[in-house]
């Protein structure tokens, strides 16, 4: 009976085993501090450190993004397995879609001709649209952001890690050869050992050192080229990030459109308790106008002073057109807390520079307080040099 055994090159096998043992010995001696090691140049160290940081943060960004898109860890693992076996991911019903189905069914049971039943059906249909928008957002985000970053980790970063591992092996071989050369030189002048003269042993050790140095230099250049490519990869990642943001913008815009349409439909239903649409465009303005009244003083010695400023003729359009070339000094009569970002906080007795607004406002002046500029109530300041302008 003929048995085909695999062909082994014993010479290469013994050589590889010897190299492995030599590397282990060299690494052990380095850990113990009993031998020297070849250090990489500063540029290479910076490139390697940047690659490590890029790898660590990219892994974290991919993980965090996937957690946002698919909060259920079991579903993420399932999707990863389907992706690896090159099969389409299962179609799952999201929580929004579950809610939508229950609302529509409940609305039908309550009565489609009743206000509550009609409203439930309308809201359920809107939730179905939101669920579809969510599916599209998750799929598009994976294509434009997480998948390219994962491909980078599994492709380019794995190649870099492999080549860096080879470079470390070449570096260990180089340092082992350097130690053998040192040892051979220390044996000069002694008797031959194992039939090999010290001179011949030194010549062989130096030959091995030249070969090891050449292999180390070549592998070092290869690894540097790969590490330099990290900059190009980050430029590509920036484009993927922009695409992800555009996907988010479209997603939230679609959701906003769905909710605006739902508000109109609910308002058109009428009924005993009609729906009043919420106008978000005026929500911030209403909030600002609702926050009025006195606020506590900030200046020392004026803890009971009122800092409520006149608001009947307060300028509203910013930035204002004012001439800051000629301003006058003014003393603050009492402390004042700014109502918003257009005003300045004032401390009692401090000196600031003021000028008239354009057009002139009877209640406010434009002021400069150090590097800050803004509106101040005219009643809170006293002019110090009305006859002499101060050029800033």
Image (cartoon, rainbow, N blue to C red):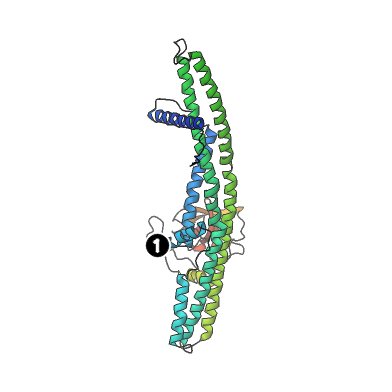
- Which residue occupies the extreme bottom position in the image? 113
Horizontal side of 211 relative to 30 (left or right) equals right
Q: Nearer the viewer, residue 307 or 180?
A: 180
Q: Nearer the viewer, residue 379 or 49?
A: 49
Residue at figure coordinates x 46%, y 77% from the top left: 101
Q: In the picture shown, does residue 229 fall above or below 196?
A: below
Q: Position of residue 303 (x, y in %)?
A: 37, 59
Q: Position of residue 380 (x, y in %)?
A: 48, 61
Q: Nearer the viewer, residue 125 or 114?
A: 125
- As helix, strand or loop, the secondary structure at mark 1 comes to loop
Q: In the picture shown, does residue 361 fall above or below 210?
A: below
Residue at figure coordinates x 45%, y 18% from the top left: 183
Horizontal side of 30 relative to 229 (left or right) equals left
- Quarter location, residue 145: bottom right
- Which residue occupies the extreme front position in the image? 1
Can residue 296 be seen in this snapshot?
Answer: yes
Q: Is the residue marked by circle 1 packed among few (<14), some (14-19), or many (20+) residues within 10 Å?
A: some
Can residue 275 be seen in this snapshot?
Answer: no
Task: Read off the residue under disc 1.
Answer: 296
Q: Position of residue 326 (x, y in %)?
A: 61, 53
Q: Position of residue 57 (x, y in %)?
A: 48, 49
> Across the whole image, how many numbered discs are drawn on residues?
1
Horizontal side of 313 relative to 290 (left or right) equals right
Residue at figure coordinates x 47%, y 47% from the top left: 56
Q: Nearer the viewer, residue 286 or 74?
A: 74
């Amino acid at each position: 009976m003929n048995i085909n055994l695999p062909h082994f090159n014993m010479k290469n096998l013994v050589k590889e085993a010897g190299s492995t043992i030599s590397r282990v010995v060299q690494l052990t001696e380095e850990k113990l501090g009993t031998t020297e090691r070849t250090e990489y140049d500063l540029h290479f160290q910076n490139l390697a450190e940047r690659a490590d940081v890029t790898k660590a943060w990219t892994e974290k960004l991919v993980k965090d993004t996937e957690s946002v898109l698919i909060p259920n860890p079991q579903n993420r693992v399932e999707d990863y397995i389907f992706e690896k076996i090159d099969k389409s991911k299962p179609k799952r019903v999201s929580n929004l879609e579950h809610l939508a189905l229950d609302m529509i069914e409940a609305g039908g049971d309550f009565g489609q001709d009743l206000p509550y039943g009609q409203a439930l059906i309308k809201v359920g249909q809107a939730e179905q649209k939101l669920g579809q928008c969510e599916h599209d957002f998750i799929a598009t985000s994976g294509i434009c952001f997480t998948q390219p970053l994962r491909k980078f980790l599994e492709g380019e970063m794995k190649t870099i890690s492999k080549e860096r591992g080879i470079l470390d092996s070449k570096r260990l071989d180089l340092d082992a050869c350097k130690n053998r050369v040192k040892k051979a030189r220390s044996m000069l002048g002694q008797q031959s050992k194992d039939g090999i003269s010290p001179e011949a042993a030194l010549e062989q050790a130096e030959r091995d050192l030249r070969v090891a140095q050449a292999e180390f230099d070549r592998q070092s250049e290869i690894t540097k080229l790969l590490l330099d490519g990290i900059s190009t990869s980050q430029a590509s990642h920036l484009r993927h990030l922009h695409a992800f943001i555009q996907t988010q913008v479209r997603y939230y815009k679609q959701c906003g459109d769905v909710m605006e349409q739902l508000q109109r439909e609910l308002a058109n239903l009428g009924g005993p308790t009609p729906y009043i649409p919420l106008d978000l465009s005026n929500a911030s303005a209403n909030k600002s106008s609702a926050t009025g009244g006195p606020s506590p003083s900030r200046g020392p010695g004026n803890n009971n002073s009122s800092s409520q400023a006149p608001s009947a003729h307060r300028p509203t359009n910013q930035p204002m057109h004012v001439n800051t070339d000629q301003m006058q000094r003014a003393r603050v009569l009492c402390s004042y807390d700014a109502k918003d970002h257009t005003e300045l906080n004032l401390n009692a007795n401090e000196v600031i520079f003021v000028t008239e607004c354009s057009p002139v406002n009877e209640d406010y002046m434009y002021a400069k307080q150090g590097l800050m500029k803004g509106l101040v109530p005219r009643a809170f300041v006293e002019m110090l040099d009305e006859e002499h302008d101060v050029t800033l």
